[in-house]
Image (cartoon, helix red, strand yellow):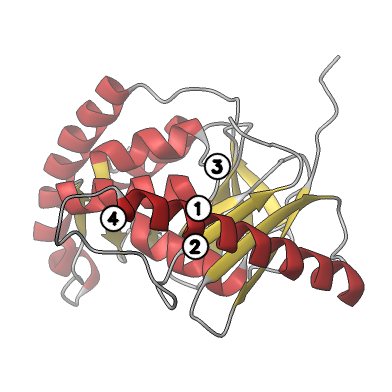
Amino acid sequence: MDEPTTQYQSYSWQDEDGGQYIVLYPGDEETDEEGKARLRAMGARELAALRAEQEERAAGAAPGAARAGRGRRRSITIDLDNPTPLPGPQLDPEWLRTWCERTGAALTGFTRSFEARYGFPPGENALAPATDDSRRAADALGELLPVPPDLATLYGVIDQASLPDVDNGYFIHSPGAVTGHIREHGTPAIEGERLGLVFGSDGGGRLFATGHTGRVWKSTTASFDGDFELVAGTLEEFLDGIGRLIAGL
């Protein structure tokens, strides 16, 4: 029998000094105003402890080292029920690299013949490989929230993908964009997932998300707050489907 799944909600805010906070708490309903006030108080305590620790480290640093001060922007994630680490399937990096090579080659032929087939030129269709900057952004995302293992593997190889002319369009968001969306919208509530992260979208603005189970979900509307339906059993299956569309299989 499968273990019961704990659903997590998120609450985010910014304080007057520019500190960014995201709190995870178990449950399937948003906490009330009294609960949010308790979370904000907890966040203030956590940030005060962080600043004290930074001051201690800066005091022992070499002369001229920067000291942590008030107003420094810093994200604080308070995990009330320790959902880390997230279990789940592990995408094979070698399979992913092979997929990128094969799909990139197919994409060249796809765009070259696009106008002859459809009567208008294609948009910019490309896979962007991971860079040092994008991997640092992925590390920052992992510090903000627990990242599903398959998604972490994806961002070790791919920064982002823009495929507007493949079917209804497929877009894999960069880790920096994912972080921005979390801070603005929080995380979606997806039944059966402890913590769902939106990592992509289609040409109509509907969202792709994955979670600790490794499954891939698609929103039924262009909203973080709507329902999500299952579209693939794993991220590998999801990517393989995109590759087959590009290759015309």
The local crowd at label 2, few if under 14, some if 14 to 19, many if 20 or more residues have their Cα within 10 Å, is some
The local crowd at label 3, few if under 14, some if 14 to 19, many if 20 or more residues have their Cα within 10 Å, is many
Residue 112 position, x and y percent, is 8, 58
Residue 6 position, x and y percent, is 81, 38
Q: Mark 2 points at which residue?
A: 75
* CA–CA distance in space, label 2 to label 1: 7 Å
**Element under label 4?**
strand
Q: Which amino acid does label 2 sit on?
A: Ser
Specify the quadrant of the image occupied by residue 35: bottom right
- In this picture, is 63 found above or below 217? below
- In this picture, is 82 found above or below 142? above
Q: Mark 3 points at which residue?
A: 146
Horizontal side of residue 223 vs 111, given as left or right = right
Q: Which amino acid does label 3 sit on?
A: Pro
**Element under label 3?**
loop
* CA–CA distance in space, label 3 to label 4: 22 Å
* CA–CA distance in space, label 1 to label 4: 22 Å
Q: Which mark is residue 144?
A: 1
The local crowd at label 4, few if under 14, some if 14 to 19, many if 20 or more residues have their Cα within 10 Å, is some
Specify the quadrant of the image occupied by residue 185: bottom right
